[in-house]
Amino acid sequence: MGPNRIPRRDWLLGTSASLLALGSSSTAAAALGQPEAPSFGPQAASDTEDADRVRRMKWWHEARFGMFIHWGLYSVLGRHEWVMEEEGIPVSEYELLAKRFQPQPNAARAWARLAKAAGQKYMVMTTKHHEGFCNFDTKLTNYCAPKQGPGRDLVREYVEAARAEGMHVGFYYSLMDWHHPDGARCATDPEARKRFVEYTHGLIRELMTNYGKIDVLWYDVDWPLDAAQWESERMNKMVFGLQPDIIVDNRNGLPGDFSTPEQEIVAEKGSRSWESCMTLNDSWGYQRADDNWKSPKTVIRNLVSCSRDGGNYLLNIGPKPDGSIPEDSVRVLTEVGQWMSRNGGSVHTLDRCQVHASEFAGFTRQGNTLYMHVYFWPGDTVALAGLMTKVKSARLFATGQEVKFEQDLFRVRFMGLPSDAPDHPLTTLAIECESEPIQNTRFVRTDRPRNGVGV
């Protein structure tokens, strides 16, 4: 990944973020004066998402929540995964870290157990980051885990750990390489380009061949070549030939199966799939001094926002050099997992949600059921303006307790609730509607009766 201060658009060619999509039913939204809604769903094939892609991505759309793992030589220094470039460390000095990188055996087992406890359904690990060090066994370079300090295949340990916990398995692979002698000169030297492209394709072939079924290939930074120079069409053809069920992202210069907004939640329009990747603090790799941790509430709010607009949330941990997970990462994800154990069904949804306007709540939807996630509990009454769909019933999602309500043209009020929030860090209401829930706050503004002045 790039440093947080560098927008991904500086690295990725041919990729642009769309404006946040707010709707789910374009016809209904247009009638209400709302933004046109994108279509979405693993069943909704389009010009850009054919039947095979729908088949391959079905599990991914249902998963919603995944764990990203950034782990490599940079973890030994503990100063961010871009430390080699940001501090100008010479290659000859940096590669000495390969002998000092000696993680405990099977550290990935704790990652997979934490991912499962947090309600995450898939994992994506760095097989090779920009530093060029391969965490896997390869015949193409000695700069790899089995031939250096670890003395074993760290990717294999990860794959086995993930599968043991029922996780779908993803591989991150950085095309950019700061270690390989052709990693920069390939931009101007045709012979260097040929060597480096074949080296890159060869490493990817090994990853796609040696570890059984792989569910996600997550390319990163295609600097300094474009898709034609990387021969990305041939690259993907090889990948799909070896892994016919895999899905790939958009960072090798081709559109891929899904887009990858980084450190922001930006929904794609139409049926285009997307996944927001974010850090738990401000660093992807282990940064011992970075204490800017997201709260469990923030993590859940981000997850709700992604789910509302049909996206996935890939949340990162940066293990220490011994493979252990920073204590604050464990603390946050454990609390998220406790909430997910009670409320996970309200975010593992397949339908985009047109309802969005509230200063104290977020929303997701499954069919005609609207889930209202109350971030800031207002007391014994929770209200929602502009719901144009008739409510049939309401309940607290975590407990199933019935909630009384009143509805008129301009609002629905859920009443008789505890003065203190009954769930932590936020409470979810499940609201059963007669049809797809649609909101029109403009109608509230323009048509709500206003008392006369001086009458």
Image (spheres, rainbow, N blue to C red):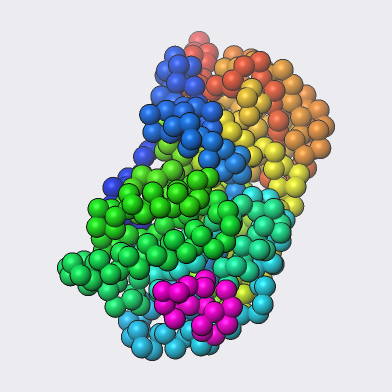
Give 275 or 430, whichever is nearer the viewer: 275
Quadrant, the N terminus? bottom left
Q: How many discs mark residues in the rendered view? A: 0
Residue 248 in the image: above or below residue 270: below
* x then y, percent, for residue 65: 60, 48
Foreground of the two, 281 or 212: 212
Residue 403, quarter of picture: top right
Q: Is residue 389 left or right of residue 339?
A: left
Is the residue 344 above or below the residue 382 in the image?
Answer: below
Q: In this view, does 400 lie above or below 277?
A: above
Q: Could you tell me what secondary structure mostly forms the magenta stretch?
A: loop
Question: Could one spot residue 290 in this view of the protein?
Answer: no
Residue 224 can be seen in this image: yes
Is residue 309 depicted above or below 321 in this figure?
above
List x then y, in percent, for residue 312. Answer: 54, 45
Q: Give the range drawn in magenta.
A: 133-153
Q: Which of 223 and 316 is in front in this view?
A: 223
- Taking the magenta stretch, the answer to whether it contains residue 58 is no
The residue sitting at 67% across, 77% down in the picture is 105
Q: Which residue is drawn at 51% across and 83% down?
A: 147
Give the percent coordinates (x, y) of residue 444: 51, 20
Which residue does the image show at 70% across and 38% down from the upper left? 345
- Residue 344 horizontal/vertical position (percent): 69, 43
- Residue 221, located in which quarter of the rendered image? bottom left
Given the current orientation, which residue lies at the most extreme top position?
Answer: 455
Which residue is at a point 43% across and 36% down the rendered structure image? 272
